[in-house]
Image: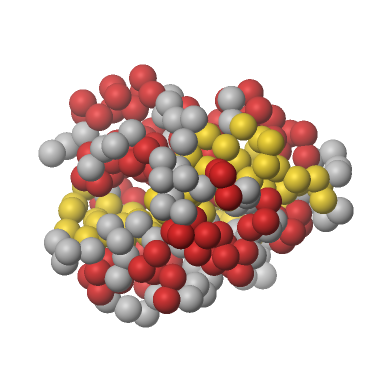
């Protein structure tokens, strides 16, 4: 079982001819209102990859709540631990350039009211893979990490966005995942970060694949599937969700990373985050085409 503790957003996605510079107004194309949020994205990615998934988070009592949850509901994610709160549903504005790269601004809204107390102890078992990010209050994330470790759950933390996290918690986390910018924000050698986790520190590198710095001092390099990206939104979330699925199935870290890398590339082939996430059949097919 995968339990995702994190954000639920509605995404305002807008294609633009180029990403704007400070002070510049850019006229975009046809916009789309789509479900998103790192927590929700990772939950749906894991579900589409075949895992049983529960989501713990919060939405507002507003018009954005239903569309923000619709993809999860249709996908079969258990939403019993999602609260309705007074704050409005979280919202992200995403500008996507012609090369598929993006810039994102997020209004946290209801995500700021997510609490570790929403997750009952019985949900944190040795057969649970707990997936977390940094779009909900970091103190609540830290509290849940401590509870999960004491009860034997495995923990995957996506250090996104790159916010401070107490270094003393690293030893409680099985796998930390970050992109290159987020990894650099730690100000520490990646190999050293890896040795302070229970299993490893994974840095995603876009078209260059990913590198895992392991707790035993070793490394694993994983290639990416060669593609022509349409929109990279949600690729990192797909990577994390599918990585967690592999670990939940009992895969070794190397095999889980290869599956995650193939899935992340597929998520770049269509617009949006949840709308572009691949299913199990597509991931298995892509695995056969992933370079050694």
Q: How many circles with numbers are drawn on the protein?
A: 0
The quarter of the image holding the C terminus is top left
Q: Nearer the viewer, residue 31 or 261?
A: 261
Residue pictured at 67% horizontal, 70% vertical: 23
Furthest residue to the bottom? 187
Residue 251: percent from the left, percent from the top? Answer: 26, 38
Residue 163: x %, y % from top left: 53, 71
Q: Which of 247 and 230 is in front in this view?
A: 247
Residue 3 placement, left or right of 68:
left
Residue 26, how many percent across, how many down? 65, 55
The coloring applied to the image is: secondary structure
Seen at 21% across and 28% down, the residue is 289
* Left/right of residue 151 with respect to residue 61 in the rendered view: left
34 lies left or right of 215: right
At 52% from the left and 34% from the top, the residue drawn is: 53
Of 21 and 140, the residue lying toward us: 140
Image coordinates of residue 264 in percent, x first then y, are 38, 40
Query: Residue at the spot x=77%, y=34% of the render?
Result: 66
Position of residue 162 in the picture relative to residue 283 (left or right):
right
**Foreground residue, 131 or 290?**
131
Whether residue 278 is visible = no
> Relative to residue 103, is residue 185 depicted above or below?
below
Extreme residue in the top direction? 281
For residue 232, above or below residue 168: above
Quarter occupied by residue 141: bottom right
**Residue 285 visible in image:** yes
């Amino acid at each position: 079982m995968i339990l995702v503790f994190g954000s639920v957003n509605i995404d305002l996605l807008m294609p633009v001819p180029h990403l704007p510079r400070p002070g510049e107004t850019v006229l975009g194309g046809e916009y789309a209102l789509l479900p998103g949020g790192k927590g929700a994205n990772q939950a749906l990615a894991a579900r589409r990859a075949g895992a049983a998934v529960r989501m713990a988070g919060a939405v507002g009592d507003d018009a954005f709540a239903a569309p923000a949850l619709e993809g999860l509901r249709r996908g079969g994610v258990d939403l019993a631990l999602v609260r309705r709160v007074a704050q409005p549903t979280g919202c992200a504005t995403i500008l996507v350039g012609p090369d598929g790269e993006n810039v994102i601004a997020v209004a946290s809204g209801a995500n700021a009211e997510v609490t570790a107390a929403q997750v009952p102890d019985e949900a944190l078992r040795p057969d649970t893979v707990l997936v977390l990010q940094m779009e909900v209050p970091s103190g609540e994330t830290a509290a849940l990490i401590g509870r999960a470790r004491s009860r034997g759950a495995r923990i995957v933390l996506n250090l996104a966005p790159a916010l401070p996290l107490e270094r003393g918690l690293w030893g409680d986390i099985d796998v930390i995942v970050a992109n290159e910018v987020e990894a650099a924000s730690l100000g520490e050698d990646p190999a050293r970060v890896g040795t302070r986790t229970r299993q490893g520190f994974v840095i995603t590198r876009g078209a260059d694949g990913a590198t895992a710095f392991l707790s035993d001092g070793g490394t694993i390099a994983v290639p990416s599937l060669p593609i022509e990206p349409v929109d990279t939104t949600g690729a990192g979330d797909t990577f994390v969700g599918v990585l967690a699925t592999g670990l939940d199935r009992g895969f070794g870290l190397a095999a889980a990373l290869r599956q995650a890398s193939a899935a992340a590339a597929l998520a770049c082939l269509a617009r949006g985050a949840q709308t572009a996430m691949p299913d199990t059949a597509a991931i298995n097919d892509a695995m056969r085409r992933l370079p050694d």
